[in-house]
Image (tube, helix red, strand yellow):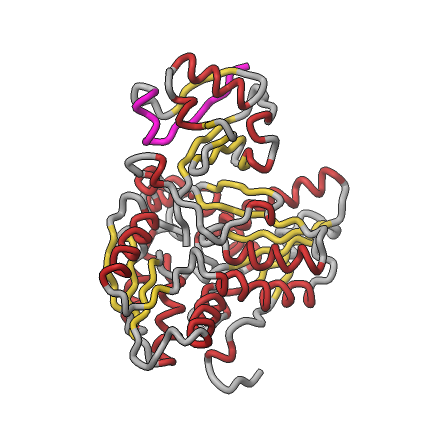
Amino acid sequence: MAVEVRVPTILRSFTGGEKQVAASGASLQAVIADLDAAYPGIAERLVDDSGLRRFVNIYLNDEDVRFLDGLQTPIGDSDSITILPAVAGG
Amino acid sequence: MRYESLLDSVGRTPLVGLPALSPSPDVRLWAKLEDRNPTGSVKDRAALAMVEQAEKDGLLHPGATLLEPTSGNTGISLAMVAKQRGYRLVCVMPENTSVERAQLLRMWGAEIISSPAAGGSNEAVRVAKELAAEHPDWVMLYQYGNAANALAHFDTTGPELLADLPTITHFVAGLGTTGTLMGVGRYFREAKPDVAIVAAEPRYGELVYGLRNLDEGFVPELYDAALLTTRFSVGPRDAVRRMRELLEREGIFAGVSTGAILHAALGVAAKEVNAGRPADIAFIVCDGGWKYLSTGAYEGGLDEAEAALDGQLWA
């Protein structure tokens, strides 16, 4: 299953400057593993031993995956994934 | 209604139904009109509460200088309160905010120090922290970590919502400092725990996320994810589209961030309709549209409005 993954500026050094890349996997964890196979090193910037890194937000169809099933969130074919760094609002 | 002073009139805002935008008679949307506060935004509640708490704590004396990183509304609210109370206010504001915000801040007597556009409010926070270290006599209320910010909503916004809408099932608000969601969320956890607390987070253009590395990210000290049911990211296109629908169909002239919140509220409403569940969904109208007229958000097609907001801190 291929999904579109939107990559923030700060991680495009891994994707050769691409803003949006394709990846596949039945769960977010599998998608991240697939990304890392294509763009080695990117997974380590997104997750650590405890799960998603503190300043990384990942959205599945605009919903924060931390409120879904985290790294175990199931991913479907027409889904889109957006990765963003956490920034201040207000 | 009569009040002893302008500051006494903060809060107790109207909650109005949205008969045209509500998807069914059983799934209803309600707008809490925070633009009816003295400076026209929800931030009056937090600003007043933070200043009053600092006064109680003995941190402020006549002529004291307040310092605050702000993308606008909190600064405008603090400027009004500070002027009434005889304090000086220095705001650190990102340069990619609307021109009206700076004009309003100066009008209420605040001094503005600009922070770089790249990095958005993160940079404003960083610059303000540096200034605080250089000026130990200045008082930084620090909306992102000040418990009085969330407490204002625990004490006022939450109880007002429950009093006006005892059948409330969902509360939707913007996620910035997180103060509104944390305070109202904590209130409902005690008063009516089955109310879902939904965050709508603005998704800005790339410039705003221009950090040098991921360790420079920022999560407000007030934030407690356990108080939220879910969290949506809303981009400028959906925010502008909903903001225009709110004006067109309900006559409510709101700012862009309210459009983002309405987008999340309508998503929640659609889910409840599909599930066949009745719902009363209350959301925050953060401010009116006046401060955003110059951004181009109200004119032309959606493509033009989206392009005009790119790189702006529109919420």
Residue B182 or B20: which is nearer the viewer? B182
Q: Nearer the viewer, residue B39 or B241?
A: B39
Q: Nearer the viewer, residue B306 or A89?
A: A89
Q: In the picture, which quadrant includes the N terminus of chain B?
A: bottom right
Q: Which residue ends up furthest to the top in the rendered image?
A: A37
Residue at the image position 32 percent from the left and 31 percent from the top: A10
Res. B104 in view: no
- Position of residue B296 measured from the top left corner of the image (x, y, whole percent): 34, 51
- Would you say residue B100 sits in the magenta stretch? no
The answer to whether residue B300 is above or below residue B54 is above
Quarter-wise, where is residue B101 in the image? Answer: bottom left
The image shows residue B272 at horizontal and vertical percentages of 70, 43
Q: Horizontal placement of B142 versus B94: left or right?
A: right
| Image position of B296 with respect to A84: above or below | below
Instruction: Tell me where the magenta segment starts and ends, as one range.
Output: A1-14
- Residue under the point 70% across and 60% down: B191
A34 horizontally vs B227: left or right: left
Is B278 situated above or below B77?
Answer: above
Name the spot of residue B73 as percent of width and height, x first: 39, 62
> Can the viewer see residue B174 in this picture?
yes
Q: Report the number of discs.
A: 0
Residue B23 location, x and y as percent?
A: 67, 47
| Left or right, residue B268 beside residue B68 | right
| Residue A7 falls within the magenta-colored stretch | yes
Q: Quadrant of residue A44?
A: top left
| Residue displayed at 70% across by 56% down | B168
Residue A87, located in which quarter of the rendered image?
top left
Please say if B221 is above or below B270.
Answer: below
Front-lying residue, B250 or B128: B128
